[in-house]
Amino acid sequence: MAARAPKELSPPAQVRQLEAALAAGPLAKAYLVRGEETYFRQRAVDAIVARARALGAEVLVHDGADPDFDAQGLMGDLGTAPMFAAEQLIVARGVEGSLTKRGKEDAPLARAILGFLSRGAPQRSLLISADSLRADHAVAKAVAAAGGPVLTLRRLYDSPPPWNPDPRQTELVQWCLERAKELGLRIDAGQALYVAAATGNDLGALDTQLERLRQSGGGDPRKAVAWQASGSPFAAADALCRGDLPRALASLEALFQGGMVGRDGAKVVDEGALTAILIGSLLRGVRQGLAASEAKARGRAPDEVLEGGGPMRERAKAELEQRLAKRPLPETWRNFLAAVLDLDRRGKSGSRLDVNDFAQLAVAWRVDAPPQASGRAPARVAGRPQR
């Protein structure tokens, strides 16, 4: 039997592990810091750069987002020994676009990085910070082969897993507790939950809220924390597919009243854009439920429809099992799919969809719905959904 792959550490644990390694010794040959959570990426980058400067290293920064970014200049630095310091750290930030293969050939920047790593130049280090870079990319594999840390810093889970529904145990709330402790602020899990709910899954904003609470002297966060949370179309779709009516209505209300934060950090409040993203997420969830229920009906494992591995797969598997335990019949999911496709057609034909349309789905799809419910949206209801 093949050995089970080690469980990936949570993003905060990966950053703590990196900081401990930096405090204990010299810089590694290379670092790869990747993932969509910019807060953790920046914290990791700052820690590496601070250690380099403490060691007296020359720090050269190349930022792919800079209008003056010059890939040739970065490649030149990779191939040139430092002139003014015994040690050197080259920081390449946001350069994943310059690492894309051209046909079957590695990109020029990728070849320059591979050359830098293969030469083993003493006292020279490379730090790559990227929003996304596949683990099987040649550069990622070369960093790992050189013994360099490879951090995968996803966003924290802001909803509880199916096997532990206590919202105080979500990664986001637990991070709030840890961060409050670092700031010298004493709060309990209930207060951390309020701060997280009021702020949303934005670690930079949460940091600001916790600091505001600390400066106010602590106590009741409702007196110091500004309510600014956005919603999540993905959380709303999950709750709808799960048949959790209270959570679905609350998620829909938060989404349509507060908008959502995109991957670039910008807030999306346009109702048309929100409905399009929500419909897309619902279609993915319903089609997955249909495929899994059909696989189960044929005597196969429902989780065959899932892609990927690691902790994300285990979480998705548990979520899928919970959905199928409540709605195991393929016919139910076919009706759900018809309902979402109907909404999609209405939206694309010019009809204005709003929170009410999705609230009706939440009511029709609730787990305690009568057996004869078709899953199609019932007649329109007036007003916004209530918690």
Image (cartoon, rainbow, N blue to C red):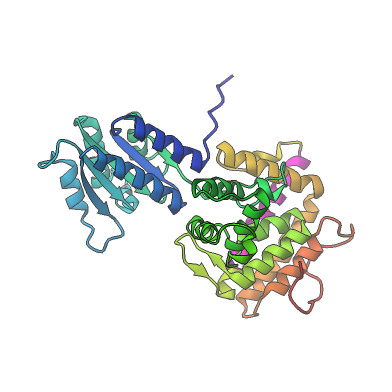
**x and y, in percent, of residue 26 in the image:** 28, 31
Q: Nearer the viewer, residue 352 or 265?
A: 265
Quarter in which the N terminus is drawn: top right
Residue 199 quadrant: bottom right
**x and y, in percent, of residue 124 in the image:** 21, 36
- Single out the residue that lies furthest toward the front: 217
Residue 138 quadrant: top left
Q: Nearer the viewer, residue 84 or 314?
A: 84
Residue 353 quadrant: bottom right
Q: Nearer the viewer, residue 190 or 104?
A: 190
The residue depicted at 76 percent of the width and 64 percent of the height is 362
**x and y, in percent, of residue 206 in the image:** 53, 57
**x and y, in percent, of residue 104 in the image:** 32, 43
- Start-end of magenta stretch: 276-298
Say how many tags the image has: 0
Q: Nearer the viewer, residue 35 or 84?
A: 84
Q: Main secondary structure of the magenta part?
A: helix
For the question of whether residue 95 can be seen, the reply is yes
The residue depicted at 58 percent of the width and 57 percent of the height is 218
